[in-house]
């Protein structure tokens, strides 16, 4: 059986988790899940591996939920190493039109020209993540380490 050769984008920083499947750099299918990344990523990728010939996986490496970033990085990095897939990343702002992203309390991550900072907003900011319609390789990079944005509370 000939499987379609595809690239995958994973945005697993919050709920819902988004997975985009790209054939010839065009979005052909989208998976949206309300499940936790630790519970759903293995089963989703088991199905994707059965259905498609994956060659590249891109993930949003932060900022976002610490646990979601850790889980998706470890799972996807391992999957790519085992299967010899290309593994790339980009920051979460790519998927929400550079809008503020919830950090903790009333703090939100904001991307400036030179850095990612936290800013306080008194009113909740809500900008859902969206998958791009086209897979543009130049928008992603090989530095796949997670970006947490703020240190863990000690």
Image (cartoon, rainbow, N blue to C red):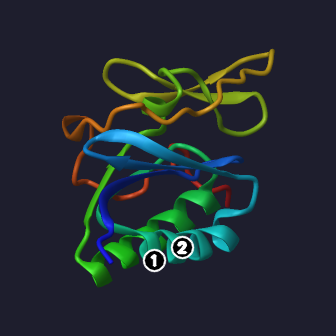
Is residue 37 depicted above or below 80 in this figure? above
How packed mark 2 is, by other alpha carbons closer than 10 Å (few <14, some 14-19, many 20 or more), is: few
- Left or right of 59: which side holds 140? left
Q: Are marks 2 and 1 in contact (CB under 8 Å)?
A: yes
Q: Quadrant of the N terminus?
A: bottom left
- Image point 79% across, 21% down: which residue? 124
Secondary structure at numbered mark 2: helix
Is residue 148 depicted above or below 83 in this figure? above
Q: Position of residue 138 (x, y in %)?
A: 19, 36
- Left or right of 27: which side holds 114? left
Q: Quadrant of the C terminus?
A: bottom right
- Image point 47% across, 30% down: which residue? 93
Q: Residue tagged by mark 1?
A: 50
Q: Position of residue 68 (x, y in %)?
A: 61, 59
- Image point 32% across, 57% down: which residue? 6
* Residue 87 image-quadrant placement: bottom left
Label at residue 47: 2
Q: Position of residue 47 (x, y in %)?
A: 54, 73
Q: Position of residue 117 (x, y in %)?
A: 49, 28
The mark total stands at: 2
Toward the bottom, the furthest residue is 82
- Image point 60% across, 56% down: which residue? 66
Residue 121 visible somewhere in the drawing: yes
Residue 74 visible somewhere in the drawing: no
Label at residue 127: none
């Amino acid at each position: 059986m000939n499987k379609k050769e595809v690239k995958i984008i994973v945005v697993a920083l919050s709920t819902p988790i988004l997975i985009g499947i790209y054939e010839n750099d065009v979005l052909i299918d989208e998976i949206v899940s309300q499940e936790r990344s630790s519970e759903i990523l293995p089963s989703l990728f088991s199905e994707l591996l059965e259905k498609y010939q994956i060659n590249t996986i891109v993930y949003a490496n932060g900022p976002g939920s610490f646990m979601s970033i850790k889980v998706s990085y470890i799972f996807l990095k391992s999957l790519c190493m085992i299967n010899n897939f290309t593994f790339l990343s980009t920051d979460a702002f790519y998927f929400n039109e550079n809008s503020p992203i919830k950090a903790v309390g009333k703090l939100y991550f904001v991307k400036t020209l030179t850095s990612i900072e936290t800013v306080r907003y008194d009113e909740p900011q809500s900008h859902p993540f969206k998958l791009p319609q086209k897979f543009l390789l130049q928008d992603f990079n090989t530095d796949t380490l997670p970006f947490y944005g703020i240190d863990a509370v000690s």
